[in-house]
Amino acid sequence: MHPVRSVSPFRTAWRAALALVLLLGWSAALGPDARAGERGQDRASVVVHGGDTLYSTAGRCTVGFNARSGSTMYGSVTGRCAQGAGATWYADPALTVAVGVTAGVSYPGNDYAAVRYTDTTGSYPGEVSLGSAGTRDITAAANPVVGQQVCHAGRTTGYRCGTVQAVNVTVNYGGGIVYGLFRSNVCSEPGDIGGPAFSGGTALGIIAGSSGNCASGGFTYYQPVVEWLSAYGLSIY
């Protein structure tokens, strides 16, 4: 994919570097209060939607979308979040309910990774969680188009909607350059990274970075989901 810079290199690099500092701050290990609420989870009751959280020895990552190859189920996370996270993923912050393993990571250049679900007693629906707004059934995937409505679900800021402003955007995170992102006028904040972005029931991408905030306004950058699906031979269901 050949990148087209839709913003100046200096401003893009500055915004993305700021977003990286902000958005990755939530990935530190959780405190005892957060762990206490999820201990003793029944393995047979595990359900992982898009928008839910998976945990590793290095922290936590948000699942963007679930997909499959035949009968094998996968979840998407950002490549930056998956790097150094270890091979095993858990449904609980106490790391007692193993549900998957890292199947591949692509960063820099791209910003996506695949988690292969290994717990066959669990459920991995095609829906995405919208927090207090319920769930949204995702049945297809497509590349974004400028002017298209886009909504996303962030772990911090919840369910928000806006418009796709640019596609094929290049962002320099300081630690690596990512090509082929798209940008919206929807705000996001620390902890939102990895959340699903969609238009109706069609998956578009996962939150990769941002500038600004939801108090004063800002932009969000996304890794297109079609590229992730193609890389691992997966389908939305």
Image (cartoon, rainbow, N blue to C red):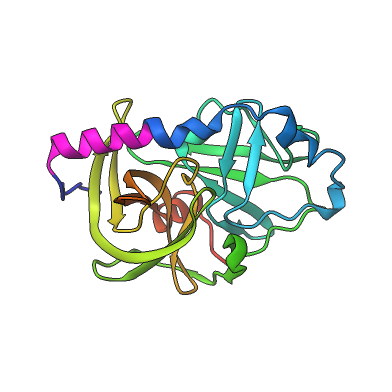
- The region drawn magenta spans 8-20
Q: Quarter-wise, where is residue 33 in the image?
A: top right
Depth check: give the residue in front, 180 or 50: 50
Depth check: give the residue in front, 158 or 47: 158
Residue at figure coordinates x 79%, y 41% from the top left: 37
Q: Quarter-wise, where is residue 103 in the image?
A: top right
In the rendered image, residue 123, in percent from the top left (x then y), is placed at 75, 58
Q: Above or below — where is 99 with respect to 136?
A: above
Q: Above or below — where is 152 with respect to 113?
A: below
In the rendered image, residue 145, in percent from the top left (x then y), is placed at 27, 67
Residue 228 appears in the figure:
yes
Q: Viewed as shown, does residue 52 lie left or right of 221? A: right
In the rendered image, residue 181, in percent from the top left (x then y), is placed at 30, 49
Residue at figure coordinates x 64%, y 60% from the top left: 70
Q: Quarter-wise, where is residue 224 in the image?
A: bottom left
As drawn, the residue found furthest toward the front would be 215
Q: Locate the C terminus by quadrant.
A: bottom right
Residue 107 appears in the figure:
no
Residue at figure coordinates x 22%, y 34% from the top left: 13
The dominant secondary structure in magenta is helix
Q: What number of labels is visible? A: 0
As drawn, the residue found furthest toward the left would be 8
Q: Viewed as shown, does residue 212 lie left or right of 64? A: left
Q: Viewed as shown, does residue 6 lie left or right of 24? A: left
Q: Above or below — where is 31 with respect to 234?
A: above
Q: Is residue 73 magenta?
A: no
Q: Is residue 9 magenta?
A: yes
